[in-house]
Image (cartoon, coloured by chain):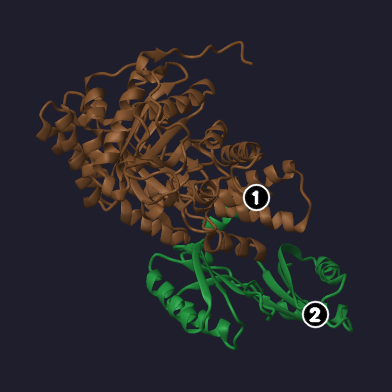
Amino acid sequence: MNKLIITVLAKDRPGIIAKVTTDLFELGCNLENVNQMILQGQFAGFFIVEAPADQTPEAVEAVLKEKTNGNGLTIHVHQLDTPEAGSGDDAGDPGEIFLITTIGPDQKGLVARFSSIIAAHNGNIVNLKAVFKGGVDPNDNVMSYQVAVTKDMDAPAMFEALREKAKELNLDIRIQHKNIFDAINKI
Amino acid sequence: MFEDHEIISTIEMVKNENLDVRAVTLGVNLFDCISHDLSVFKKNIRKKILGHASELVETCDAVGEKYGIQVVNKRISISPIALVGACFSADQMVEIAHELNDIAKTVNIDFIGGFSALVEKGMAKGDIALIEALPRALAETQRVCASVNVATTKAGINMDAVYEMSKAIKKAAEMTKDDDGLACAKLCVFSNIPQDMPFMAGAYLGVGVADAVINVGVSGPGVVKRAIERNLSEQRLTLGKVAEIIKRTACKVTRVGELIGREVADNLGIKFGIVDLSLAPTPTVGDSIGEIFQALGLSHIGVPGSTAALAMLNDAVKKGGAFASSHVGGMSGAFIPVSEDLNIANAAHKGYLTVEKLEAMTCVCSVGLDMVPVPGDITVETLAGMMADEMAIGMINAKTTATRIIPVPGKKAGDKVHFGGLLGEAMIMDVPHHDLTDQFVTFGGRIPAPIHSLKN
């Protein structure tokens, strides 16, 4: 097993994924997972590959940088740690996912303040979306955290702390189990 | 992963469109509590109900909190008392009502339904005692709800029972005259009563249902209204498209109800029964059936076009519910209760909605003449006639219909009545010729069941 994770950052334009995956293919890498997003015109991509046994992360990074030289891509390659038995993502209580959504005016440090409360209670943020467009429509300023809540956490205390913080910052906060969003939207 | 609009629209449904779970109703079978000894019977029903319901309110609150959707009312429905208490006298039936009222207070629920009788084809000893006990039972308790099924499509209409119920309603109103006849707001007279309905005042646990069961009533007229308004503001729609929007919205709301109902049932270790998606309004602005009619371009509920609009609404709600869940039951349609819906009450007050038009609309709604305050001096015969008419609509059309008519003692058409809370307030509706004493209903007997062929 020689799994590598490759991150690619660039100004978004057509052909980035085609270029990177072609280069990886030519290096003999087998693509296992890809995820990408675009934030304000900036492309961010994550590629997990099974690389040939003799390929080191440094070697793959060097080849990719050489092949994409001049294309404005920022590339990093790291060895992907294999989770040990009984630990990591594949073990223990995966928790139940709650969506914590705040709606209200943009202020500096919002994400930092809320994520700190979640971290202080051992909550793991599995997904975060934050959109701050400003303006008068409250729905244009929304943060939505998907947080895994495990049985060993004091979830009521975390929810209470988040509600307190939202009240202090004049934000409307909703804390709801993920299944309600599935029930309404995933038909 | 959810899209922004999915998150926002879900939150909007709860926050601004009054989506809630209107009622989680625990059904409890009482047949194994039967005894000829009243004190033993009361002890048995207390033990049985508390055994299932002691955690009901806390569980509903916890599940509601988890999903961010309030379970507004927690209720209990029981086997018909006229059956399980068939050996008791009317006075003893009143004692049972007091016991039920006390049990409801103990478990902190607002209503317990099932002080009921099924008499569509005739009245047995227990039925007669229960109907005789009704005025006192409802006047002396706060949380007991009663229902009497006097007609079915297969049996016809028991006109003796209709007449007796008219007398009972008048008497119950008189006994609570200081509260505008409030006892009658807890009493429904039915044709084709569903045995799994979670909504009060008609909820009871049918004889063909499990020992204990969780039935859920979801509402959401505000959600439907906003969905219509949102789409109409974006494009010009045909009514076929509007019906599709209502259907899709009803589907989403039903799924919410089933999700919460199943989790409550699992947590209590009780079987899940059905989800009843009924557009049940409250006196809150934005939580109104009447406002849906206005969103559909009618100036008020009750004007010409209203019956057609209601037919489309009721059918689309049923279709959406049926698509969302294989366990849909109860009423599942649109309610048009006059005093419980501020907008409907206003339409009645301004003369757009008359009693006659309301009756016509009940041909296509899911209930009937619901929460209709009428002059206190309406005669027993006229009241019975109104009830018989409504029962006939249900019987012939093979659908549920009901009446919850409140003759308000000492008040006349146009006077204001206030029942409080979800029961709301309204002006008393004019009932033309309400002082007639026509003989028709006094003949008694049974109007035979209708023919099931030659449908025209």
Nearest the viewer among B98 and B216 is: B98
Q: Estimate the x, y position of residue B62 in percent, counting from the top left.
A: 37, 59
Q: Chain of mark 1?
A: B
Q: Amino acid at mark 1?
A: Ser
Nearest the viewer among B96 and A130 is: B96
Q: Is residue B310 left or right of residue B51?
A: right
Nearest the viewer among A24 and B102 is: B102
Q: Estimate the x, y position of residue B344 in percent, counting from the top left.
A: 53, 48
What color is chain B drawn in?
brown
Q: Is residue A39 above or below residue B229?
A: below
Q: Secondary structure at mark 2?
A: strand
Q: Is residue B268 left or right of residue B430?
A: left
**Mark 1 surroundings: few (<14), some (14-19) or many (≥20) residues within 10 A:** some
Q: Say which residue appears at 42% left-offset and 25% top-offset.
A: B385
Q: Residue beneath label 2, please? A: A10
Q: Residue beneath label 1, please? A: B299
Question: Which quadrant holds the N terminus of chain B?
Answer: bottom right
What color is chain A drawn in?
green
Q: Amino acid at mark 2?
A: Ala
Q: Is residue A55 above or below residue B443?
A: below
Q: Say which residue appears at 52% left-offset and 74% top-offset.
A: A172
Q: Quadrant of residue B365?
A: top right
Q: Say which residue appears at 45% left-offset and 76% top-offset.
A: A163
**Are the residues flagged by discs 1 and 2 from a single subunit?**
no
Visible in this render: residue A101?
A: yes
